[in-house]
Image (tube, rainbow, N blue to C red):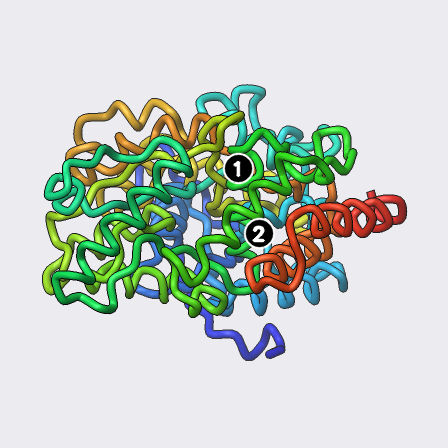
Amino acid sequence: MPSLRKLQRCSLLGLAVAGAALAVPQALAETISVACGSADANDYCPILAKRWAKETGNQVDIVSTPNNPTERMSLYQQLLGSESDEVDVLFVDIVWPGLLSEHLADLSEYLPDTASDGFFPALIDNNTIDGRLVALPWYTDAGLLYYRKDLLEKYAKPVPRTWEELTATANEIQAAERAEGNKDFWGYVFQGRAYEGLSCNALEWIASHGGGTLVDTEGKVTIDNPDAAAALDMAAAWIGTISPEGTLNHTEEETRGVFQSGNALFLRNWPYVWNLANGDGSAVQDKIGMAPLPHGPDGESAATLGGWNLAVSRYSRHPQLAAELVAYITAAPQQREHAIQAGMNPTIEALYQDPEVLASNPSMGELYDTLVGGIPRPSSITKAAYPRVSNALFNRVHEVLSGDIDGTTAVAQLQGELTRIGRRNW
């Protein structure tokens, strides 16, 4: 892991404009270090941080962090574990607030009581650990079903509302397309590698079957039930039938590649796929739609929440200014601009009714209901143990998909394993 001194930095001196209402005397100016996403041209965080510096007369120091989330988390743990004051504001994944909470400031101590108003409640709940608001949501994601609307029209099939309907439609259209000459065509592609993405898929299958959310809000492990087992057995039946064997090693990008090349009817993925699959050169440009994920016979559609947040280090020498910068970047005007200019999904509900936001990316309107009902991963309740919880989940589920164990065995094993982890850690 590179030391902080070796990280690429860029600084901007805040400009004090004579007579401006927001100008701050130079003697009072402070420097706030911000660990944004990647500090490249596609990252809007540095743009807004520098604008805040200009408007307030302070300085910002943009710290470039690794693009790989695992490496970024390791860097954060290194810095925060040593109680370093070198980074004030941190860019954190949706599952990190619980892991890092002991090192993060309570934003409610520095911001007005209304600071969390207007955000999706599930995201604020995710970022509130033991009553402490440790991060504000910056942009969000949720699992979605993409489909080939041209092929559903061709075969007079509706968008599936249940997993049973998806399976039947995928089987029928896959067989028909292969009969017409596309031997590489598949009915459904999803993320099946043993990693965090499989945990997201598994939570969606289980919750949409009425099988709960793995660990409930009180910290009780709830995975060992027939509905959860049935959900996993259902997914295992897809491998080699409507989903390729390669699914066992597929992440988001592999599945997008299959779908975008025209070789799949249905895809489970995140909202970022919409613009790419409709871009120039895509084999499915203007041929796709998106919808909520299907549900089981005794459940409702469930989408795992994703996204990124901004937090303040407990060891910051300027927590008030750092909190004000976080509030500025995540405020409605800046989120609106971020959505229009960069296509990112806002975390403020009202922006999903903004005409310009919707015009910039029609998929955002489709996403609203999914986000309202989105399910967070159990990272807030399991705190620092979440990586072990997720690891246990995706490894057992991968064994089910691989045909090594069945759903009933998997959920029983998970119940025991997670209970042991929870007894010691949350």
**Image location of residue 249, percent across then percent down:** 48, 69
Q: Which label's residue is closer to the chain start, 1 or 2? A: 1
Q: The N terminus appears in which quarter of the rendering?
A: bottom right
Q: Nearer the viewer, residue 155 or 284?
A: 155
Q: How many labels were placed on the picture?
A: 2
**Image location of residue 209, percent across then percent down:** 54, 33
Q: Amino acid at mark 1?
A: Leu
Q: The C terminus appears in which quarter of the rendering?
A: top right
Q: Look at mark 1 in the image and give the residue it sits on.
A: 136
Q: Look at mark 2 in the image and give the residue it sits on.
A: 199
Q: Is residue 103 visible?
A: no
Q: Nearer the viewer, residue 79 or 50?
A: 79
Residue drawn 66% across the image and 44% down it: 379
Residue drawn 22% across the image and 57% down it: 276
Q: Quadrant of residue 336?
A: top left
Q: What element does badge 2 sit on? A: helix
Q: Nearer the viewer, mark 1 or mark 2?
A: 2
Q: What element does badge 1 sit on? A: strand
Q: Quadrant of residue 22?
A: top left
- Give the distance between the C-alpha atoms of the residues marked 1 and 2, in whole angstroms: 24 Å
